[in-house]
Amino acid sequence: MATLEKGEIIANRCLAGPYWEIAVRLPQVAVAARPGQFVHVRCGAGLWPLLRRPFSLFAVDREAGEIRLVYQVKGTGTLALTKKQPGEELDVMGPLGLGFPLEPGLRKIWLVGGGVGMAPLYFLAREAAASGLTCDVFLGAVTAAGLLHQELWRGVAARLELATEDGTAGHKGVVTDLVETVLRGNRPAAIYACGPLGMSRRLAVMAAAAGVTGYASLESRMACGVGACQGCAVRLKDGSYRLVCRDGPVFRLEEVEGEPDGP
Amino acid sequence: MATLEKGEIIANRCLAGPYWEIAVRLPQVAVAARPGQFVHVRCGAGLWPLLRRPFSLFAVDREAGEIRLVYQVKGTGTLALTKKQPGEELDVMGPLGLGFPLEPGLRKIWLVGGGVGMAPLYFLAREAAASGLTCDVFLGAVTAAGLLHQELWRGVAARLELATEDGTAGHKGVVTDLVETVLRGNRPAAIYACGPLGMSRRLAVMAAAAGVTGYASLESRMACGVGACQGCAVRLKDGSYRLVCRDGPVFRLEEVEGEPDGP
Amino acid sequence: MAPDLSVSLGPLRLKSPVMCASGTFGFGEEYTDYLDLSQLGAVVTKTITLQPREGNPPPRLAETPAGLVNSIGLANPGLEVFLREKLPFLRRRRVPVVVSIAGNTVEEYAELARALEGTAGIAAVEANISCPNVKEGGRLFGSRPATAADVTRVIRRSTSLPLLVKLPPLFPGLMEVAGAVEEAGADALAVTNTLPAMVIDVQARRPVLGAGTGGLSGPAIRPVAVYLVWQVATAVRLPLIGMGGIATASDALEFLIAGASAVAVGTATFGNPRAMVEISTGIAAYLEERGMSNLREIIGSLRPGGCS
Amino acid sequence: MAPDLSVSLGPLRLKSPVMCASGTFGFGEEYTDYLDLSQLGAVVTKTITLQPREGNPPPRLAETPAGLVNSIGLANPGLEVFLREKLPFLRRRRVPVVVSIAGNTVEEYAELARALEGTAGIAAVEANISCPNVKEGGRLFGSRPATAADVTRVIRRSTSLPLLVKLPPLFPGLMEVAGAVEEAGADALAVTNTLPAMVIDVQARRPVLGAGTGGLSGPAIRPVAVYLVWQVATAVRLPLIGMGGIATASDALEFLIAGASAVAVGTATFGNPRAMVEISTGIAAYLEERGMSNLREIIGSLRPGGCS
Ligand SMILES: Cc1cc2nc3c(=O)[nH]c(=O)nc-3n(C[C@H](O)[C@H](O)[C@H](O)COP(=O)(O)OP(=O)(O)OC[C@H]3O[C@@H](n4cnc5c(N)ncnc54)[C@H](O)[C@@H]3O)c2cc1C
Ligand SMILES: Cc1cc2nc3c(=O)[nH]c(=O)nc-3n(C[C@H](O)[C@H](O)[C@H](O)COP(=O)(O)OP(=O)(O)OC[C@H]3O[C@@H](n4cnc5c(N)ncnc54)[C@H](O)[C@@H]3O)c2cc1C
Ligand SMILES: Cc1cc2nc3c(=O)[nH]c(=O)nc-3n(C[C@H](O)[C@H](O)[C@H](O)COP(=O)(O)O)c2cc1C
Ligand SMILES: Cc1cc2nc3c(=O)[nH]c(=O)nc-3n(C[C@H](O)[C@H](O)[C@H](O)COP(=O)(O)O)c2cc1C
Ligand code: FES
Ligand code: FES
């Protein structure tokens, strides 16, 4: 069950460039949260901004009743969030949406993250590790500074492959290039992805070609976050609209449209 | 000449209850400022609030290029102002409006302040003292906590009379009662007033009856602050409208309507 | 004693004047984790059409200063699925259910009204006439007195349920439409739907919304909505439901004082899912502070303020 | 090379598309401490009437979320004082002066236009037809095609100066009025004036504004204003001046892309007196980034975005 919970901010700091991390004491959210779910956050004060902003759960400590989010400053909402001080309250709805399913019997999975999209995959990796799964992790970013929390990733990944578009760390290029190369010799039980839509679409095509199943977490602008407003619709491969907040944010890779939108 | 100046906030602290004081380094504003003038301040960030807020100059240090404002937290704008941290910039237009005239030849003047309206009178008292005038000061507030900066006032006032509506300090009642009593035996060269409209109106009637001249600083909601929008009109005794930002905020007591508005 | 917040919208009695605005609260079930539906004056459903509607191409939302522009396109599961899958849930809550309906033609409105007539658990029908009339080349039903009256009259004949009619914002001309709808037999009027709006992505030089244009809601429109409610209140005798940008009890009171008998909360719920409950509490506190025992002492109690 | 920001509004040539909105910039002199008037596309004066006007009883301003409601009531010194005391100052600046005029009757508009005709230093007339027509019982001149065309035609005959006509916001019906005003001989249209609005003081249960009602401006109305400009752009061939809530270069670009040839900045100047200059600079930077040399490449360049 989701709740509306106001919890104390424990830390809120800049990781690198536009990337921040916030930790909040939210026992009810923490106890119910599953990897791939998101929280809907009142980032500012008053009407500025008006709407909440959705963020994936990056890490959850159920005992301590704490959640952590990693966020990239993009506009009004995320900028307002950086102003929140430890000790202040954060107003959060969640956990919301359907997370990444970890079907029993899986042995080895691949996690593919692009940019700040890697956030929910870390929560997933921790849960997967706890239930004995092996995770190979592929992370991509524009530049080295965007490859956040490498030390944490090293602790959970059986194999960690990195890519940056400018070549400042790891493979020079996009993360899907790496996945494509490795897919030639290897095959995971499933791929779990989160990143820009283009990344998920390319993965959908690649996974289909390789006969591998998987999941991708999609994004959309949200108002309600709970399926009430119909605002966050995305078009799936079969042409139908689905709600990211209620039917997702995680969809089967097979459902994700493989081709970019027309003009 | 008025300027648009962005200056560093030196201090911003709560004095008591809803009363705050902010000090800002604004050399251009400071050098031009006269008692009774005001500054027009961007209190928040972005569109929240949309309009600037006017505040009287409480103290000005021309050498240091600093100004100080005393403000009462009332709504969006003043609340936003409390969030500003030392080191941040404050965006200020000013000095604006016509201040208190100190005509040559005056010997002894009375300053009458109600609530946070006492702010501009302190700047006036300092300037008056510097030019050899004697100031008797009458200050009123709802309760003792509202009688701000008493130590500073003691340094500039030849005589300091206090009133609180709840009787927690000084005379129990409104400040105009005090003035009325003292007026029976005494007569200043001029009265300088700033406070709620009701106070200025009552003083206008009392001063007229006693044949004393004087000045009152009036308030109105403002948009432009420079006479461009016609938004801050007040009705004077002769029925005409005048602009608080351009024709005031200081008006002759003789011009102030003596009677409260009809229903 | 707690003040009496109950109000009547013609034959429809509500125990609180605060309800949700159609389309912002789904079918109620979406928000049950956050509030107790029985604390609301009514639940107004997302607008239902005869056939299911997929809605407009995304993006469907764009936030603007203190506002939200949406182009949902009446995405809804259609009458049949509503009756089968959505209504039963609502029927079990102790809250009046107002079903919002829209048609492409006058006949579709009638058909929807007839279908709801016989159904248990429906307290009222709200005709959303702020949508395009397919037969009249896409003009809004609600934009002209004659068509607005037509659709009202036909629904009135098709159902004995209390009939609320939700008007679009019109400048000028809303009073004429309101008068015509009153004449045609509505029991109450809802004012206002969203304002026509557009947001452009200047990087792409395209509209942000997939549908090109949308409707503006939220606190940005509140002063306009209060004006429209006040204007309609002077023109008709029907009870009004005021809405547009209500986020706090004080906002709601502006509408009640201007002449609305009830208020609806839409966009504010997205930021604060408990807004409606907090607004009810705030209205009660306002009455208590003034020693008023009944909401009616407030409704339409605006005193003159100058020359208008 | 810096991009060419000059535009033509019919016979009126401006070196920048960014001007002030009538009534928010006084007669220019009030803002000379803050910016160099010659950097503006034009200075549009406060609306002038034949006789001086005191304006409405205070309060005249109420701030709302991202908006401002005003009821100034066209307070202005009247034609004579304007010509004698305000125009000489403006004439000495190197900036086109657009004089906004309003009358209570069609004849008053004509008289104002004739008086300006012979005067040196006036670049254009802007007819503010968003004010009540005393003869027609207070309806806005601009609210009906016939009256809007009447007043335009009469002014057109009374002056050879470029004639801009400023329209009120209308839902629906703005396209019809715009078409009628085009027919009647306007050189350009300004869209939009403020939206009708009301703010209530719930403690006093009175309107906050002395006049009761007012007009909403500021970022709150921007999505509505962009919509109206886009709509009018599809309906007429005249150049448009877009306004309503413009505070940044990006806001201004929305209007230009939607089809406006120039933009006006009103409420934003109150918060940031240098807004107009910063917006000009921002538009130039936008063109440069895209390798565009001329503003015309942007005007009306909206690509389709879905089904509307
Ligand atoms: C389920 C879900 C989980 C998410 N998890 C995370 C996370 O863990 N960390 C994180 O940093 N972000 C995450 N996001 C994205 C995050 O919600 C947005 O970056 C945030 O809402 C931006 O808010 P803002 O107010 O800062 O920017 P805004 O001011 O709203 O927008 C900034 C810029 O981005 C554009 N923009 C914003 N949203 C979209 C969109 N959906 N599509 C296209 N353009 C858009 C705007 O037009 C604008 O130019 C998630 C989103 C979803 C839906
Ligand atoms: C020339 C001048 C000098 C001033 N000097 C000072 C000063 O030195 N210190 C100081 O604390 N204040 C001063 N003020 C008053 C100060 O500007 C206001 O208190 C401030 O603008 C309130 O802003 P806000 O956003 O906090 O409140 P808002 O949210 O704007 O308003 C808070 C409440 O007060 C009401 N309100 C606000 N302004 C008015 C008004 N003019 N008339 C009636 N009701 C109103 C609102 O309706 C609301 O209920 C001065 C005003 C003027 C005109
Ligand atoms: C996302 C969204 C969807 C809406 N859908 C409907 C609808 O289906 N039917 C309807 O009559 N109004 C609809 N509306 C309009 C609201 O019911 C309400 O009239 C409007 O939003 C103004 O109120 P608010 O400012 O409180 O949101 C919708 C509004 C929003 C924001
Ligand atoms: C205080 C104020 C006074 C105004 N006076 C006039 C006026 O005299 N004539 C006119 O045509 N428009 C007047 N307007 C409307 C503006 O010119 C402009 O059309 C409107 O405010 C929308 O633009 P904005 O959102 O940038 O302010 C006034 C607006 C404000 C806020
Ligand atoms: S955000 Fe409202 S339905 Fe998804
Ligand atoms: S605030 Fe604009 S004229 Fe005074």
Image: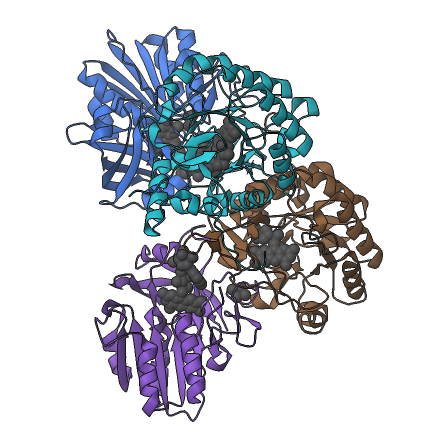
Chain colours: A purple, B blue, C brown, D cyan
Look at 30% across and 57% down and name the residue there.
Answer: A85
Q: Give how far across and how far down residue D246 sits, in percent.
A: 44, 41
Vertical position of residue D236 compared to residue A77: above or below = above
Report the side of C156 relative to D70 (left or right): right
Q: Give how far across and how far down residue A147 sits, in percent.
A: 26, 71
Q: Is residue D209 visible?
A: yes
Name the image quarter holding residue A59: bottom left
Residue ranking furthest to the right = C157
Vertical position of residue A46 compared to residue D27: above or below = below
In terms of depth relative to the viewer, which is nearer, D237 or A81? D237
Q: Give how far across and how far down residue C199 sits, in percent.
A: 50, 51
In terms of depth relative to the viewer, which is nearer, B219 or C280? B219
Quadrant containing the N terminus of chain D in the rendered view: top left
In terms of depth relative to the viewer, which is nearer, B65 or B121? B65
Disc tally is: 0
Vertical position of residue B137 compared to residue C40: above or below = above
Q: Give how far across and how far down residue D55 sits, in percent.
A: 53, 21
Quadrant containing the C terminus of chain D in the rendered view: bottom right
In terms of depth relative to the viewer, which is nearer, B217 or D229? D229
Report the side of A30 relative to C150 (left or right): left
Look at 45% across and 38% down and name the residue there.
Answer: D263
Report the side of B250 relative to B24 (left or right): right
Q: Is residue C22 visible?
A: no
